[in-house]
Amino acid sequence: MPGYIERFIAYIDKETKQLQENILRQALIDKRKELTSSDDEIIDYITQMENIKRQLLAPTSEWPLLGEVFVQFEELSIMMGKAGLKMRDKLEIVIHLLRKNLATEIATEDCIGFDERLVSRHEFKYLTKDEVYDILYDKRYGKYIKGYMSIDDKLTEEEERKVQELKEVLDSYPVDIKDVAAKHTLLKQHLFDKWPLISNEDIAIVVSILSSFGLHEDISEALRFNLRKQVMKREREEQQASISKPKYVYKYQEGLSDREYKRLNRALRPYFDLNSMVASQPLTLEEQITCTKILMDMLLDDATIIAILNQINRLGPKDNHPIRRYLELYDKLIYYSGEDEIDELIAELEQAFKQLFIADNEDYEIIKCVIDDDLNKVLTLIPATYDYEKDKAREV
């Protein structure tokens, strides 16, 4: 069992036991035998937890055989929040349930969507609770409930009586499975079929659909951030692949003595090896400015300096921590302000940074992700001409 499911199931088991004990204890204190409306609400919540647990524990090998579709994403969001799960676990659980739904061939009419709470509320005449789940799990019954059974799928008289009773109950608690099915088809087209070659347009569609399912905003936005990181990673790789390796820099530059060249070459070596024309290591912004100063002192032309700095930046940032990167790059961002899109992202970054000081642990992680996302976005808008680094190098 994956760790994210194991952790959530442990919470559900503990919470279910605690709530059941609370109901019993309060009943004893009040000296009553009947349930109150408050008890009914707690029982509904327990039923929802049991439903989520049951679907999470369904073996993946049985997914194609199932006729039930999970649709309670709003309730799921609430429970995962109460469980104190890390955002990574929350996203894994959501993706797990979406994959399960798609494996049931949700776009076909075999599948059934229903409100789990009706099972606990309704007094069935011919069915036990376990038999209800058996029917919901079996696509053969799903076909019958949808009214298009074939002769080969003929049920016994007892089976037909039970299924007919459930059909009547389901009809009284309708769930728009066609809308859910259509949206899952879009999720398949824009996420699962295209992964990892998704686009920003795909991400917008995916997040919009999950929000319409009732998934809470913090989870939807965290998913947007993670998907956006994949897009930016691919874009960087494509961009880096197109960057040509800088041409070999000849030892003797016009106006530069051999002694001065050797001195500058030694100073440059910790950052860039001119002999192999390969970057030595990722650099901080300050180190890039130092490197740029050395390259300018070597009297290299602008195109060569840009090519070398591109080569260095292919290694990525020296420190990946979003907040430290933001503080390090802040002056550079301000240098390039004046463009509407850049100014908007800078404003968002400044606002997010202020929110860090009043955020709790979970909000802190979300804000950190937002800063990382916005920072990567604004960096793609800054031209790779290194004007900031060159201007700073001239001041040294």
Image (spheres, rainbow, N blue to C red):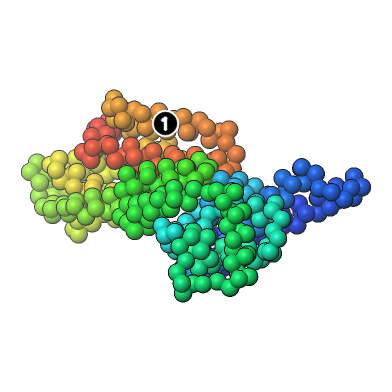
| Relative horizontal placement of residue 326, taking residue 10 as reference (left or right) | left
Residue 323, given in percent of the width and then of the height, sits at: 46, 40
Is 302 drawn above or below residue 73 in the view shown?
A: above
Residue 282, given in percent of the width and then of the height, sits at: 33, 51
Is 264 drawn above or below residue 326 in the view shown?
A: below
Residue at the outermost left position = 254
Q: Indicate the quadrant containing the C terminus: top left, top right, bottom left or bottom right.
A: top left
Identified at 52% across, 60% down, the residue is 145
Q: Indicate the quadrant containing the N terminus: top left, top right, bottom left or bottom right.
A: bottom right
Q: How many marks?
A: 1
Q: Is residue 210 visible?
A: yes
Q: Tell which of 108 and 255 is nearer to you.
A: 108
Q: Tell which of 297 and 209 is nearer to you.
A: 209
Q: Crowding at label 1, few (<14), some or many (≥20) Cα neighbours within 10 Å?
A: some
Tell me the quarter of the picture where residue 372 sits.
top left
Residue 84, given in percent of the width and then of the height, sits at: 62, 49
* Helix, strand or loop at mark 1: helix
Q: Tell which of 383 and 141 is nearer to you.
A: 141
Q: Is residue 110 visible?
A: no
Identified at 27% across, 36% down, the residue is 382
| Relative horizontal placement of residue 326, taking residue 307 as reference (left or right) | right
Please, what is the three-letter code of the amino acid marked with disc 1?
Glu
| Relative horizontal placement of residue 337, taking residue 55 as reference (left or right) | left
Q: Which residue lies under the disc numbered 1?
A: 348
Identified at 52% across, 45% down, the residue is 215
| Relative horizontal placement of residue 203, taking residue 43 as reference (left or right) | left
Identified at 63% across, 64% down, the residue is 162
Residue 209, given in percent of the width and then of the height, sits at: 43, 45
